[in-house]
Amino acid sequence: MSYVDLDGCEVLHGAGGSKAPVVYVVDLPEHPFDLAAAAEGLRAHVVRVPVRRWDDSLTPWPAAGVRPGSPDFGGRAAETLAELVGATIPAVEAARGLDPARRAVCGYSLGGLFSLYAFACAASPFSACACLSGSVWYEGWVDYLRRTCPDGAGRYAYLSIGKKERRAGAPIMRGVQDDLEACAAILREHGCAVDLVVGPGNHMQHHTERLAAGLAALDARLARDR
């Protein structure tokens, strides 16, 4: 099954030219982010990557739903990452004449979890990531990152969350800020540069502002590292 909607991918060109870094933003086709507003003024190019069936395609292994009776998570992130890296990225960059030296991945909620997963995988093609209100409460995630986190020297992660997120949602979700702080500590222990930002609002608020801040942080870091 294909999880990435290649036909729905959209490239927002930055000011940096064909060799500028590219940030791949995981998006939900049914409720897309205002990416044009969030990406305004960047040097890096930004690619919207619509991904189908979030609960399956963006989760790293199967897990029970967050509440009794809710659908289980499918755990197909490895397949989605293989599709993104092996097919989507080459197709998008060839079609648009992009030849970046560095790439980043960015996402919100389960997209943020997937972005951190893609960043932390062995032989990851991404030198930076933004995990925005990421679902790092996911069962087993922090222990997995602790066991498998690669060398982060020369790499960068931007993590952000709303200060009210720990107060809402199913019980498993209420440790999300503690879990995000644990992720930041693990990445730093492995030599990765990390910014952790706690901003206003809950999980359902300030989407565009968090996305814009994450993209700006990636843009600045990738420009500095060239």
Image (tube, rainbow, N blue to C red):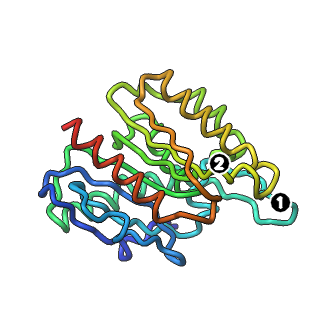
* Residue 173 pos. (x, y %): 74, 50
Q: Is residue 15 left or right of residue 73?
A: left
Q: Is residue 154 left or right of residue 27?
A: left
Task: Compare marks 1 and 2 and give the one earlier in the sequence.
Answer: 2
On screen, residue 102 above or below 144: below
Q: Mark 2 = which residue?
A: 61
Which image quadrant is residue 14 in? bottom left
Identify the residue at image location x=44%, y=59%.
Answer: 211
Q: Residue at x 60, y 35 (%)?
A: 181
Q: Is residue 2 visible?
A: no
Q: Residue furthest front?
A: 200
According to the picture, the residue beneath numbered tag 1 turns out to be: 67
- Circle 2 Cα neighbour tier, 10 Å, few/some/many (<14 / 14–19 / ≥20): some
Quadrant of the rendered image containing residue 226 = top left
Between circles 1 and 2, the one closer to the viewer is 1
Q: Secondary structure at mark 1?
A: loop
